[in-house]
Structure formats: structure tokens, C-alpha cells
């Protein structure tokens, strides 16, 4: 049997999750939003740092939270739900039925195992959209962020990606639009998203911490989100120059800032664009100071990237390690001020 959904618009994107949701929103809801706005309305911004055994280097650094896609549905008032399915065979049958019914379906998996991407590092929770399959050829057809054209992936690679035996797994997570109705106005959705983002970055909402703890399992070690996650990263960075694999640590961070599909600046480029949009739609909540701080945070994260690239090439440069540490602390101070300003308006509103 062969199935292919051909009426799906797939625009390329800076980030997989916000790009996939932008395209799915257009398909199911007729809502055409910039990717950065989709990211912001999903309360996507975060700073997640945790240590983990079995991967190299033994930590992960994310600039977005774990539930952006579901949070976007909540802020817009959409009936979109995601489900984990630990049984690999049943997981395939579930999404197979969706595309057979003509419904593009959100998938999540470790990009390392997707054979059309040739990604060299384990990166869980990559988002892409299933559009079809060919059982005789044992291949599936997906829409991904890097190319408007449909990509072909082997069924075995897809199965391995969705629930890998090594590293972190999202256990065959998939998402479904049960309705295309958008119940909230963009202005209301903006207010909800800003409040959620502020509460998470300031540590009053620990939902992202709990979500990451559930995915990582019972393993010990460091785990922090929001501004605390950013500060934990700065503390760990100060120790890395003494590690034998310091260069690998630096290379990972440099990749995490831009190359891992963040939309630039560790997702801060997206957030800065969202802040400019939010100022137009909710001037009661977002002023020029907030917009300027968001832009500064993005600029500072982008400036950290070449510093980490230099350390990846020469991990013995003590002065460069000091510069990197100072840059991260400056970023922390900027984001502390940014979310403090937002809290003054957003939390008072609620």
C-alpha cells in the first residue's frame, strides 16, 4: 500500500517545532503566522541545562521548553493533543491510520537516526510531519524544516528515531489536531503566552522542569530550567576548562546556539521578533525597554557562539574561557532584567 498527502504546504524554518506547527496551523486552521510568532505564542523560550550519562559530552543545553507545541494549542484555544506510545508496533499503526485518513501528523524523534538528515549528534524531540508511506519500499514520506520538498526515510530509521534504545526517547510521541477551530484572539493568546513564559523563566512554574525530569528518568545529576538553568550553565562553564574533553564541551555549546536549529541566538532571535510583534498586539504588556532587552539577549547569545568556536579549536586558552564565562553572566543579567520588566506588566495583569 502507498499513501501520500499532497496538499500540504511545507515552508522551511529556523526551528523544527515552530516550523512544523506553523505549517500545521496553516493546514488545519487556515492561520498563517510568522514562525517567530508561533514560537512566542507557544511560550517556547527557556534555558534548560542537565547532565546525562551515556552521551558525549555528558550534558544537554536547550533554549526552548519541552511542551511548546502543546502550549501553543492552549494559548490559541486549539484542540491539539500529543500522545506517547511505548509500543513501537502500535505507535506505527496509530500514525499510519492518520495519514491514511489524509491527516498530516506531527512526529517526534531523535534526529540522529533519521537517515535523510545525517545528523552526527543525538538530539531528541526533533519535530517533523508524517505525510505518507510505501509499504512495499519500506519507506515513509515526511516534511522537515530544512527543505520544502518531501523527504524519504526508511521505515526502520523512523522506528529507531521515534523510540531509540540509546540516549533520551520521547516514546513515539505524536500529535493530532482534533479540530481546526481557533477559540482565542491573537491578542489574548499573546497575553497568555507572555505570562506562561515569565512564570517559567522566573521559576514559579516548574512544568518544564518536571517534563524534562520525566523524560530523563531517575538518573541523578544536575537539572535546571529558566533563569536558574542559565545560571547553572554559567557555573558549569567555569569548570570545563579543566576537563580533558573541554573542546567537545565548547563545540556542543557553539552548535546549540545556532546550528541545532534554534532560529539563531539560542532561540532568542525568534523571541526578539516575537517581542516586536507582541508590542504591536499588546502594547499594554510589552514596551520599548522590553523589546530592546530581548534584542540585546539575542545579540549576546549570537556573540557567544564565536567564543565557543574558538574554545573548540583551542581549549587551552584560559583568557578565552574567562571571556566566555563573562559573556554568559552578562546574558544572565540581561535576561534577568528582561523577565523582570515583563513580570511587572504581565503578572500584574493576571
Image (tube, rainbow, N blue to C red):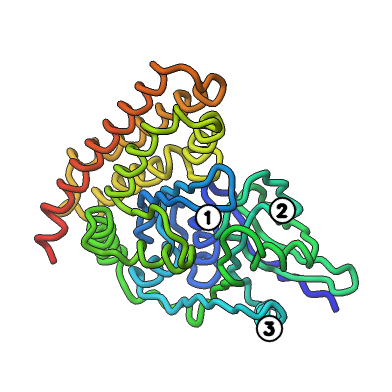
The answer to which of 75 and 311 lies nearer the viewer is: 311
Q: Which residue is mark 3?
A: 90
* Left or right of 118, for residue 85: left
Residue that mark 2 sits on: 149
Q: Is residue 98 in view from this perspective?
A: no
Q: Nearer the viewer, mark 2 or mark 1?
A: 1
**Tag in front: 3 or 2:** 3
Judge depth for marks 3 and 1 and give the one in front.
3
Could you tell me which secondary element the residue under label 1 belongs to?
A: helix
Depth check: give the residue in front, 106 or 288. Answer: 106
Residue 291 at x, y percent in the picture:
24, 40
CB under 8 Å between discs 2 and 1: no
Left or right for 165, reference 37: right
Q: Is residue 93 above or below residue 32?
A: below
Q: Is residue 23 above or below residue 276?
A: below
Above/below status of 235 relative to 242: below
Q: Which residue is mark 1?
A: 19
| Figure quadrant of the C terminus | bottom left
Instruction: Write the residue at 15% across / 53% down.
Output: 343
Mark 3 to mark 1 CA distance (whole Å): 27 Å
Q: In the rendered view, does 288 fall on the left or right side of 169?
A: left
Task: Check disc 2 and report its element: helix, strand or loop.
Answer: strand
Give residue 339's position: percent from left, percent from top.
21, 48
Q: Residue furthest right?
A: 136
Q: Residue 203 bears which disc, if any?
A: none
- Considering the image in quadrants, where does the N terminus appear? bottom right
Q: Nearer the viewer, residue 224 or 135?
A: 224
Answer few, some or many: residues within 10 Å of disc 3's Cα (few below 14, many 20 plus, some between 14 and 19).
Answer: few
Q: Residue 154, located in which quarter of the rendered image?
A: bottom right
Amino acid at each position: 500500500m502507498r499513501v501520500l498527502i499532497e496538499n500540504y504546504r511545507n515552508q522551511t524554518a529556523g526551528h523544527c517545532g515552530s516550523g512544523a506547527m506553523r505549517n500545521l496551523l496553516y493546514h488545519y486552521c487556515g492561520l498563517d503566522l510568522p514562525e517567530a510568532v508561533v514560537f512566542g505564542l507557544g511560550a517556547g523560550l527557556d534555558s534548560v541545562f542537565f547532565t546525562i550519562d551515556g552521551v558525549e559530552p555528558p550534558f544537554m543545553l536547550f533554549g526552548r521548553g519541552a511542551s511548546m507545541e502543546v502550549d501553543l494549542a492552549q494559548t490559541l484555544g486549539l484542540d491539539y493533543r500529543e500522545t506517547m506510545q511505548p509500543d513501537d508496533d502500535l505507535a506505527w499503526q496509530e500514525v499510519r491510520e492518520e495519514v491514511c485518513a489524509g491527516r498530516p501528523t506531527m512526529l517526534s524523534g531523535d534526529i540522529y537516526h533519521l537517515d535523510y538528515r545525517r545528523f552526527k549528534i543525538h538530539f531528541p524531540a526533533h519535530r517533523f510531519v508524517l505525510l505518507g508511506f510505501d509499504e512495499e519500499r519500506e519507506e515513509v514520506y515526511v516534511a522537515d524544516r530544512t527543505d520544502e520538498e518531501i523527504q524519504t526515510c526508511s521505515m526502520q530509521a523512523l522506528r529507531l528515531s521515534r523510540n531509540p534504545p540509546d540516549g533520551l526517547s520521547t516514546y513515539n510521541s505524536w500529535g493530532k489536531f482534533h479540530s481546526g477551530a481557533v477559540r482565542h484572539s491573537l491578542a489574548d493568546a499573546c497575553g497568555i503566552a507572555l505570562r506562561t513564559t515569565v512564570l517559567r523563566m522566573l521559576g514559579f512554574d516548574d512544568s518544564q522542569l518536571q517534563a524534562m525530569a520525566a523524560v530523563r528518568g531517575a538518573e541523578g545529576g544536575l537539572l535546571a530550567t529558566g533563569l536558574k538553568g542559565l545560571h547553572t550553565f554559567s557555573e558549569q562553564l567555569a569548570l570545563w576548562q579543566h576537563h580533558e574533553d573541554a573542546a567537545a564541551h565548547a563545540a556542543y555549546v557553539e552548535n546549540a546556539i545556532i546550528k541545532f536549529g534554534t532560529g539563531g541566538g539560542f532561540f532568542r532571535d525568534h523571541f526578539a521578533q516575537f517581542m516586536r510583534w507582541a508590542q504591536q498586539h499588546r502594547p499594554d504588556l510589552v514596551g520599548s525597554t522590553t523589546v530592546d532587552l530581548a534584542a540585546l539577549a539575542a545579540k549576546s547569545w549570537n556573540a557567544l557562539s564565536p567564543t565557543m568556536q574558538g574554545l573548540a579549536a583551542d581549549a587551552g586558552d584560559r583568557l578565552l574561557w574567562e571571556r566566555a564565562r563573562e559573556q554568559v553572566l552578562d546574558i544572565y543579567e540581561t535576561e534577568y532584567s528582561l523577565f523582570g520588566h515583563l513580570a511587572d506588566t504581565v503578572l500584574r495583569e493576571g
